[in-house]
């Protein structure tokens, strides 16, 4: 999935005015020179306004990528009992100059909130980002959340990297995890895939692969749920304060429903151990409306089954299926923790090239007044 982005802003006097939202109400608040308001998640026109700055940033950073699509972000808002969202926009001269999103988990990590701040490049350096961040932090506090996180991502060598880092640090956020974005041109050379698969099979004797598109078959759902729970804590998280996620089949089905509502196809391959257990899985998401770029999602191998080159086998198999099912796809994008050396080695052998860097930021709010 594409990460949240914290954008730079130079503070100028501003007014932030939170208004009513479908699931959240806040009093009129004056912060420091523009007007910001919450938007209703069920209002298509307002959602389009909210989405505009986000889209503008992605187009500036990654002009060759379709990026997030409006209907994808809209579908993500419908996760009752699992996640809650509050959306807001900032207006300057009656133009939506920026937007924010505050995401809170409802089943685990109950002290945490994830914040996205997006400022249209045409309106940066006017205090928009600072005002939006202050409004988002207040919403997080009002919801009882005190551990805030956000992610900044920039193309490799972009001057925006330093600006976004400075903005996050000035707001009191600390870097807790370095990440890297890589891209793979597809189709991959069939001879390379064959060589990698043959090499991996030597270590993976006794394992077999199963695949599906869309919902996980019932016979593998329990294993898929256990792997999802493990994925939430086993992947490198640096200094990020994160608790294990609570997964069950109902949550898996709700997640799959949201992905389908986003109109994304999920290509999945799983490794089954000799004793019939799901030992690992790998997923690729393909936006049906814009299949040019696909996204490598989770790849996870259960700890007891590591060391058998299952990660390589899973990725090779899924890339082959991707080409068969979506011949229009030309690139696959993935993001890994910079410290996740085993997965990075697999990706680089497949031909992934480094195209961007990212930082996960974290801030702990005090229990007193927010401002």
Image: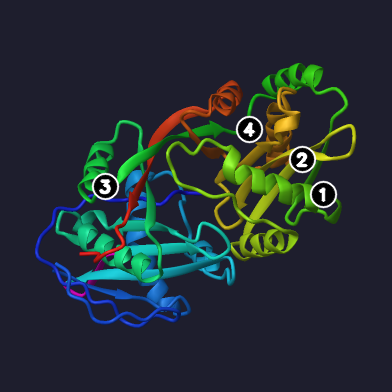
Q: Is label 4 in a helix, a strand or a loop?
A: loop
Q: Position of residue 74 (x, y in %)?
A: 50, 68
Left or right: where 214 falls relative to 169: right
Q: Are marks 3 and 2 in contact (CB under 8 Å)?
A: no
Residue 187 is labelled as 4
Name the residue that disc number 3 marks.
168
Q: Is residue 85 magenta?
A: no
Camera-side mark, 4 or 3 = 3
- Magenta-highlighted residues: 93-98
Give the mark nearer the N terminus: 4 vs 2. 4
In the picture of the structure, the residue carrying the numbered disc 1 is 220
Q: Nearer the viewer, residue 54 or 339?
A: 339
Q: Is residue 358 visible?
A: no
Residue shown at the point (25%, 49%) measured from the top left: 172
Q: Position of residue 137 (x, y in %)?
A: 31, 63
At mark 3, the secondary structure is: helix
Do the CB atoms of the residues marked 2 and 1 lie less than 8 Å apart? yes
């Amino acid at each position: 999935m594409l990460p949240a982005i914290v954008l730079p802003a130079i503070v100028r006097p501003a007014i932030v005015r939170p208004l009513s939202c479908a699931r959240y109400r806040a009093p009129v608040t004056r912060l420091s020179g523009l007007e910001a308001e919450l938007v209703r998640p069920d209002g298509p026109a307002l959602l389009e306004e909210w989405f505009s700055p986000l889209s503008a940033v992605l187009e500036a950073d990654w002009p060759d990528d379709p990026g997030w699509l409006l209907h994808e972000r809209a579908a993500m808002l419908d996760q009752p009992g699992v996640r809650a969202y509050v959306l807001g926009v900032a207006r300057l001269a009656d133009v939506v100059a920026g937007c924010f999103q505050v995401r809170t988990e409802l089943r685990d990590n109950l002290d945490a909130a994830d914040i996205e701040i997006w400022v249209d490049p045409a309106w940066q350096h006017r205090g928009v980002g600072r005002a939006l961040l202050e409004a988002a932090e207040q919403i997080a506090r009002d919801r009882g959340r005190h551990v805030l996180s956000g992610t900044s991502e920039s193309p490799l060598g972009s001057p925006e990297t330093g600006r976004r880092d400075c903005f996050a640090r000035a707001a009191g956020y600390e870097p807790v995890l370095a990440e890297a974005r890589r891209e793979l041109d597809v189709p991959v050379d069939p001879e390379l895939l064959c060589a990698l698969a043959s090499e991996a099979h030597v270590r993976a004797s006794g394992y077999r692969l199963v695949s599906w598109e869309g919902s996980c078959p019932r016979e593998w759902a329990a294993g898929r749920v256990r792997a999802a729970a493990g994925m939430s804590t086993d992947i490198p998280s640096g200094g990020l304060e994160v608790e294990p996620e609570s997964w069950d089949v109902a949550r898996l089905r709700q997640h799959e429903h949201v992905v389908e509502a986003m109109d994304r196809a999920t290509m999945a391959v799983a490794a089954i151990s000799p004793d019939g257990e799901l030992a690992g899985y790998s997923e690729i998401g393909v936006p049906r409306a814009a299949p040019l770029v696909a996204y490598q999602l989770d790849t996870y191998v259960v700890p007891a089954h590591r060391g058998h080159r299952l990660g390589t086998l899973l990725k090779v198999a899924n890339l082959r299926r991707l080409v068969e099912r979506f011949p229009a796809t030309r690139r696959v994008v993935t993001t890994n923790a910079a410290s996740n050396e085993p997965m990075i080695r697999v990706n680089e052998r497949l031909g992934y090239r480094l195209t961007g860097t990212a930082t996960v930021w974290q801030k702990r709010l005090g229990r007193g007044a927010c401002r």
